[in-house]
Amino acid sequence: MTPANSTLERSSARASKRPRWSRRNPYSAVVVRNELLTAPESEKEVRHLVLDIEGSGLEYQPGDAVNVTPANEPALVAAIVERLGVPGETLIADRKGERTLTNALTHGFEITSTSPYLLDHLANARGITEVADLLVGDRAAIEAWSRGRDVLDLLNLDPTWSPTPEAFLAELRPLAARTYSISSSPSVHEGTLHLTPATLRHPATDAWGDGRDRGGAASTYLADRVDEGDTVGIYVTANKSFHLPEPDTDIIMIGPGTGIAPFRAFLHERSNDDGNGRNWLFHGARHRDQDFLYREEMWAMEADGNLRLDVAFSREQEEKVYVSHLMGGEGEELYSWIRDGAILYVCGDATSMARDVEETLTAIIRDYGDFDDDGARAEVERLREAGQYRRDVY
Ligand SMILES: Cc1cc2nc3c(=O)[nH]c(=O)nc-3n(C[C@H](O)[C@H](O)[C@H](O)COP(=O)(O)OP(=O)(O)OC[C@H]3O[C@@H](n4cnc5c(N)ncnc54)[C@H](O)[C@@H]3O)c2cc1C
Ligand SMILES: NC(=O)c1ccc[n+]([C@@H]2O[C@H](COP(=O)([O-])OP(=O)(O)OC[C@H]3O[C@@H](n4cnc5c(N)ncnc54)[C@H](OP(=O)(O)O)[C@@H]3O)[C@@H](O)[C@H]2O)c1
């Protein structure tokens, strides 16, 4: 083999390992089902989507994630176009080539959240004191102020500013794909890929003063703008550190809210293998009848003896009950599973749930494993490093 040939072979071997579908080249998957999982009267809105991936070459394991390329809401796009005072058909030239302003705002840029470049421009080039004061504060204050605000809010902070479309777009971030845990099992739900998105909606408040509802880009896209029969652009990201262990290993899964998504995949996959590993799920919902996700399936698995199920209903009594409280109540048994090698998985909210769960886990290990506080913390670290404590939190 000549050196040139071997280089060619190595690079084509690399190319064939590269996933065919990617951020730049997403697969157009047909939506087979798009249904509401939560009760219509629930304050939560969580959906179940089934995508057809038959023949796509897309492959996934339970624990992996799917990325969705969203399209922004037409009403918000139209409002920004109107504010810029030019026709939506105005042609914009950038490194993506030439496209209309409406197309660029729909598919090219983040418009549902604030942009750091735009904030910086307003503070420094436009002298907007509210923003300048904000930017000298800490990150948490900027995040709190930004929550629910979008780029139209920022534009409207300076009514005298009339940027050209190009100057305005230059201050925005490119539109990113959104990641969702895959909630299906490739061996049970063959040829399909399921996801479980919660819809982010910020209904108009008096404080906004403009009567405009705001919402998340991808979650409202999936809820409001994608019907059965439509296509969505997707690609898969493997998450090797969150895959299932051998079928005979016990697993403990902690997933309140949409954190249940990968565990639905795990449980279906495991119902289809012939291992003896036990499965224990802690789920959390506000109300049993409203937002206990996939409850019929979970009850059926429990009835078949394939699942030990503990669900914390946070709003059915005066005091909040969370997954961490239920874990604490089962501390002795939970510790015995961990001591015997069970893998512990946590999925869902990173900010408060995952922290509370880790505190409870540390207390359980201290109380039932004969450790002091420092020893229990070190043991949690050991479990993490050994891959016995795995988190996928967002
Ligand atoms: C590994 C991973 C797995 C995930 N799996 C799931 C899943 O299974 N199901 C799921 O629903 N989501 C999941 N997510 C979150 C998902 O990727 C999106 O972040 C989520 O759907 C919001 O995206 P959006 O485009 O609708 O909102 P954006 O357009 O990104 O948000 C708009 C604005 O809403 C505000 N905002 C953002 N988040 C919140 C919030 N939580 N509460 C209130 N206001 C907020 C902010 O001001 C934000 O700027 C996962 C994320 C990761 C990283
Ligand atoms: N960063 C992102 O992109 C992103 C995207 C989506 C969601 N999230 C975060 O994830 C959270 C969960 O979203 P979700 O829609 O899946 O769930 P959710 O329905 O908001 O919550 C599920 C259950 O968890 C409870 N809970 C609240 N705090 C808890 C805690 N510290 N420990 C244990 N349980 C707790 C809730 O109780 P109560 O509501 O009664 O308190 C509810 O019963 C959101 O609130 C958000 O902060 C982040």
Image (spheres, rainbow, N blue to C red):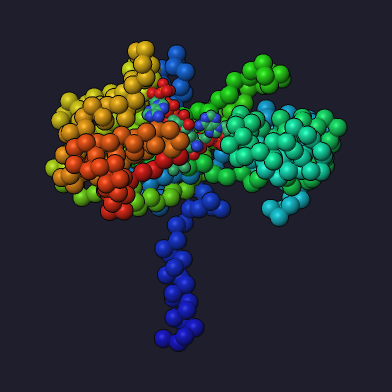
User: Going by the picture, which residue comes out furthest to the bottom?
Assistant: 2
Residue at figure coordinates x 59%, y 20% from the top left: 203
Along the horizontal axis of the image, is 130 left or right of 197?
right
Q: How many marks?
A: 0
Do we see residue 341 in this rendering? Answer: yes
Q: Position of residue 278 (x, y in %)?
A: 17, 38
The quarter of the image holding the C terminus is top left
Q: Position of residue 150 (x, y in %)?
A: 66, 32
Tell which of 185 and 127 is nearer to you: 127
Tell which of 213 and 19 is nearer to you: 213
Residue at figure coordinates x 16%, y 29% from the top left: 304
The quarter of the image holding the N terminus is bottom left
Do we see residue 53 in this rendering? Answer: no
Q: Position of residue 101 (x, y in %)?
A: 74, 40
Along the horizontal axis of the image, is 79 left or right of 383?
right
Residue at figure coordinates x 30%, y 49% from the top left: 378
Displayed quadrant of residue 347? top left
Along the horizontal axis of the image, is 346 left or right of 154?
left
Residue at figure coordinates x 48%, y 77% from the top left: 8
Q: Position of residue 220 (x, y in %)?
A: 55, 30
Q: Does residue 179 lie above or below 95 as drawn?
A: above
